[in-house]
Image (spheres, coloured by chain):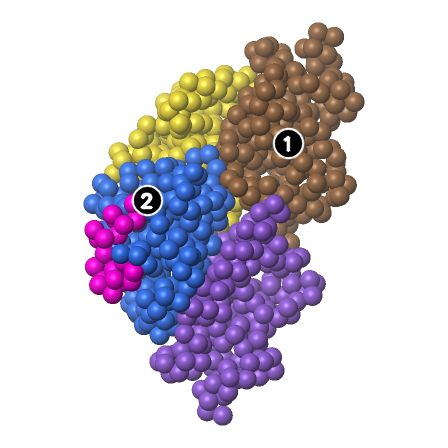
Chain colours: A yellow, B brown, C blue, D purple
Amino acid sequence: MKIALIMENSQAAKNDVVYETLKNVVEPLGHEVDNYGMYGADDPNSLTYIQNGILAAILLNSGAADFVVTGCGTGEGAMLALNSFPGVICGHVQDPTDAFLFGQINNGNAIALPFAKGFGWGAELNLSYIFEKLFTGERGQGYPEERAVPIKRNKKILDEVKTKTYRPLVDILKDLDQDLVKGAISGEKFEELFFENAKDEEIIACVKELLGK
Amino acid sequence: MKIALIMENSQAAKNDVVYETLKNVVEPLGHEVDNYGMYGADDPNSLTYIQNGILAAILLNSGAADFVVTGCGTGEGAMLALNSFPGVICGHVQDPTDAFLFGQINNGNAIALPFAKGFGWGAELNLSYIFEKLFTGERGQGYPEERAVPIKRNKKILDEVKTKTYRPLVDILKDLDQDLVKGAISGEKFEELFFENAKDEEIIACVKELLGK
Amino acid sequence: MKIALIMENSQAAKNDVVYETLKNVVEPLGHEVDNYGMYGADDPNSLTYIQNGILAAILLNSGAADFVVTGCGTGEGAMLALNSFPGVICGHVQDPTDAFLFGQINNGNAIALPFAKGFGWGAELNLSYIFEKLFTGERGQGYPEERAVPIKRNKKILDEVKTKTYRPLVDILKDLDQDLVKGAISGEKFEELFFENAKDEEIIACVKELLGK
Amino acid sequence: MKIALIMENSQAAKNDVVYETLKNVVEPLGHEVDNYGMYGADDPNSLTYIQNGILAAILLNSGAADFVVTGCGTGEGAMLALNSFPGVICGHVQDPTDAFLFGQINNGNAIALPFAKGFGWGAELNLSYIFEKLFTGERGQGYPEERAVPIKRNKKILDEVKTKTYRPLVDILKDLDQDLVKGAISGEKFEELFFENAKDEEIIACVKELLGK
């Protein structure tokens, strides 16, 4: 699975520790990590948590990423922004039990983590346990086993509901403030990573237009 | 402020303890609580967490409620469902610090709580502290004070983004599975509470149609 | 390592889930679990959290167990009782990070867990992650690595201090209320497990006397 | 009530924020705070968590303080050190529910807090809620009310047990490494605060001797 990491301006300085922790846990499990930045506190290509939502929606809906790991100070802003877009189901995860249950029950394609609140000394431990319990084994199996049927049914209904509640992503991208959208895809490695991996032609075309290509 | 409580089938048995705890905390603060059920494990008008999302969207967008307190086993399902609808900004809150920061920074109009995960003995204490820290004083002031300006700006941008990303609620309600929607407004006290408080004529008309009135 | 499980009356009904979870995690790691009860809510040989302290001190100081897993409603009572005795260093552990850090930094020989507070649905997940992070690999290595020297030094100083602050266990056992002490060693399997594993002759003799043997 | 704050070397830089937060919460409740340091990362009078235990035992047993708030990186080391001494019942407290339940059920005279683990941005909020729930109202009332009788009985039994398990404090102070003990009472304001408030003549005499007075 291709996992994209996206971090916003207030916690950009922690990009290294989060990226290293994520890679160390998920690469042995057979996943890949694409680091979409911000790449530190001084990264000139700044992202707000709202832009995390725009970028995550582009990556997930285009197939450039299978899963997005993001966050902000408390994780709430990033979670709200991601869930404002079609094709994104973003959990808010604070501990390993959250991670496991979100993976098994809600089976979304993104998580938002608190990178400041509760993120004290030793926070890399909690992070690594979260990634371990989320990305080990198959997600979406329900928990406990005997509740698997209604859990999977509800997930399917939520997916269907979400196809009705949002506008198409390309329409959204055209109607949003264009500076906001362009800023979301201005990261140093965005073009390289996105065009190598994206599959949806309509979104690829839209992104090209946004980039003036 | 009028606070609506909405609980789904898996945790319906806890409606009493949550309702009493919420009332005990917020009534002295000058708020009112409307209990939209489910009213116990045997309540025949069952709600799934997805229907919590539909009902919350109807209440918040119509002005029938100013704030929604909801949840499910982990809170994630209800949070995802609510955030799938326009006009809803639903936090995922597990402790009093989450509650305060969500209120001050994200300033949403709903929270989803874990009513099973971590909800052991003494859980009513954590609940009451959460309500206290969320509903005391004015929300949306930012935290800490010196970060108030960018925090409020981002909240405003998120609000604007959300006006572009969702379809209109009435269109959504007409396109969703009609049994699903009707089930969401079948609670024993829904009609009484909703028609007494709702203000948006278009949504009121839509709900009347759904109820066959 | 031989791990003894001790539970008190208020949470005795959870003995099965805690014992099974502990065994499932630690047996594959090469450890053994001795279940000292209570064996359920109806177990006639009742233990209070204070008696957990007496029993844990007997097991650890005699060599009948290398490590004790115990707890009570919040874990605080059991923790306080165990730490009231010589030869016992009991952590209070609520999450996997607590477990890992206690193992690496404090390197004690007991933990007290909250078996009621926060022990909601899915609590067996948190339990199993706690056991996994505590009992995997070698404890007492310090964390992070570069702090290993002062951490190990402090642990050694604490051990030395504790040799001065407590009275000898056998003297304590003789001076405490004898019904309290006898109750602590009245569990159905105590005699079998204790005499098979204890190594300290003085404590063995003291226990025999207490049992009227 | 007179509350003493004691912090060790690894988290000494947080003395200000902890002291201010504690004072802001407890002074309006009618309590006083004595800050025994360390007074910052550069304070030359360094305390290890073990010395926190020695100092807390001197303050509580002499009557110089009614309650001790302490901690270390995870809180475990300080908790273990304090509970190694007679006359001290020190809880390990991580959240407001811990604080309330420890106050009502265990009714100890000290708490050890994690000043590094989980102590991220906004940690002053959790701190202030902890102090609020611990120090508001009367402690030792049991919780819930209907369990007050056995809870108070067990607390009384623990107190009695502890009178048998430890050696007298003055004997301990004489037998411990004298540099360790002297270091524990070397804080800049120790003499002023201690001699103004201590009531136990034997401990006062012992402290004077240690100070070479």
> Which subunit holds the residue at mark 1?
B
In the image, is residue C196 part of the stretch drawn in magenta? yes
User: Closer to the camera, A194 or D185?
Assistant: D185
Would you place residue B27 above or below residue D36 in this image?
above
x and y, in percent, of residue B122 in the image: 55, 43
- Local crowd size for mark 1, using a 10 Å CA cut-off: few (<14), some (14–19), many (≥20): some
User: Closer to the camera, A71 or D154?
Assistant: D154
User: Closer to the camera, C40 or A140?
Assistant: C40
Lateral position of residue B95 relative to residue C132, left or right: right
Distance (Cα) linking label 1 and label 2? 40 Å
Would you place residue A38 above or below residue B196 in this image?
below
Q: Which mark is residue B16?
A: 1
x and y, in percent, of residue B123 in the image: 56, 41
User: Please, which residue is most extreme toward the right here?
Assistant: B196
Would you place residue B127 above or below residue A169 in this image?
below
User: Please, which residue is most extreme toward the bottom here?
Assistant: D213
The part of the chain drawn in magenta is C188-209
x and y, in percent, of residue D65 in the image: 57, 73
Image quadrant containing the N terminus of chain B: top right
Residue at horizontal 49 percent and vertical 69 percent from the top: D87
Q: Are marks 1 and 2 on the same chain?
A: no
Image quadrant containing the C terminus of chain B: top right
Lateral position of residue A83 relative to residue C88, left or right: right
Q: Amino acid at mark 2?
A: Glu
The residue tagged 2 is C188
- Local crowd size for mark 2, using a 10 Å CA cut-off: few (<14), some (14–19), many (≥20): some
Characterize the magenta stretch by its predominant secondary structure: helix
